[in-house]
Amino acid sequence: MQLPRRQFLSLAAGAGVLAPVSRLARAQAYPSHPITMIVPVPAGGQMDSIARIIAEHARISLRQTIVIENVTGASGTIGVGRVARAAADGYTLCYGAWATHVVNGAVYTLQYDLLSDFEPIALTSITPWLIAAKSVLPASDLQGLIAWLKANPDQASAGTSGVGGPGHIGGVLLQKLSGTRFGFVPYRGMTPAMQDLVSGQIDLMIADPASAIPQFRAGRIKVFALTASSRSASAPDIPTVDEAGLPGFYLAPWHGMWAPKATPKSIIATLNAAVVEALADDTVRRRLAELGSSIPPRGQQTPEALVAFHKAEIEKWWPIVKAANIKAE
């Protein structure tokens, strides 16, 4: 049966309007299925813990589950690279850090650009780390640790989460500022490194609070100082490096969230709103504080603020890392 010409044209025009409307409806429906957030470190450490806390709350406003996928290896470059190659549809995100999104650019020849291949969502946390040692090490404070290291040059071993990780960079700075020498043992994350510190297989670590404080409270390791200028509310009994005798040794890795390049701004705005809401929640704030992390002020939680902060951190740390001649192994 043939349609009258007028009716045919009317239906054709309607179809032409329907296509863009359908596309708009699909965009407005985001997210319509679960989101995967890649965390490029092993499960159990501080970074993974904070990512899960934020994801758990963000799903409430997004009305979708955020599935955490731990993709480890090469100091996080494997997981971050997977996000860089993912579809820009808002369903694959990266929970990254100072190590993965700043230091790795100075240590590795990356297959992605840390600034131009990602869309920033939000800065989520800032965390000073700790100087820790095995429980049987013969030192009771930071000055004692430094004296022991000087008395045993090149004999001690320090665990790290990999080349260029916070523990590695921190260890290099510790050697420089204290005039000591010791070796590094790279692990696939902070959790296995902490396990070996507890068992005494390694001597010391620059460790994240989530890994170190529970073991410290249980008496399984020693903690000598916090790498910050003021004490932590979650561990007020631990002195700062200034108080402990190594002034200026500050190391406060941070976390943020990114999507692949060209992810629509409307999707970025939706994700940012969910993260900001999570960071404002009292329970989330308490749990992050228990992990030794502080939440950036509201004005620093925007995508634009993360861009500026990220660039400034690269400009600050790349010269330091390169001067230390830290190379991927």
Image (cartoon, rainbow, N blue to C red):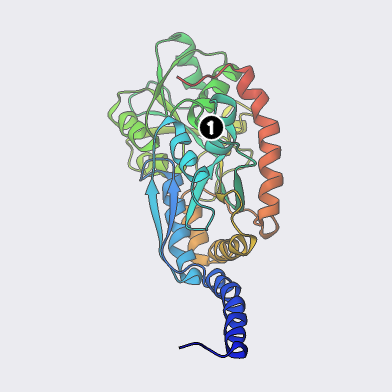
Near-viewer residue (221 or 270): 270
Image quadrant containing the C terminus: top left
Mark 1 surroundings within 10 Å by alpha-carbon count, few (fewer than 14), some (14 through 19), many (20 or more): few
**Image location (x, y in percent) of residue 325:** 58, 16
* Residue for point 53% across, 66% down: 281
* Residue for point 62% across, 84% down: 9
**Image location (x, y in percent) of residue 70:** 38, 45
Image quadrant containing the N terminus: bottom left
Near-viewer residue (123 or 211): 123
Near-viewer residue (107 or 137): 107
* Residue for point 60% across, 33% down: 243
* Residue for point 55% across, 65% down: 274
**Image location (x, y in percent) of residue 174:** 55, 22
- In this view, the residue farthest toward the front is 2
Near-viewer residue (107 or 86): 86
Quadrant housing residue 295: bottom right
- In this view, the residue farthest toward the left is 199
Quadrant housing residue 59: bottom left
Q: Is residue 19 visible in this depiction of the protein?
A: yes
Q: Is residue 1 above or below residue 298?
A: below
**Image location (x, y in percent) of residue 115:** 64, 40
Circle count: 1
Horizontal arrangement in the rendering, residue 280 relative to residue 131 (left or right): right
Amino acid carrying mark 1 in the image: Gln
Q: Is residue 239 visible in this depiction of the protein?
A: no
Horizontal arrangement in the rendering, residue 183 relative to residue 231 (left or right): left
Q: Which residue is mark 1?
A: 111
SS state under label 1: loop
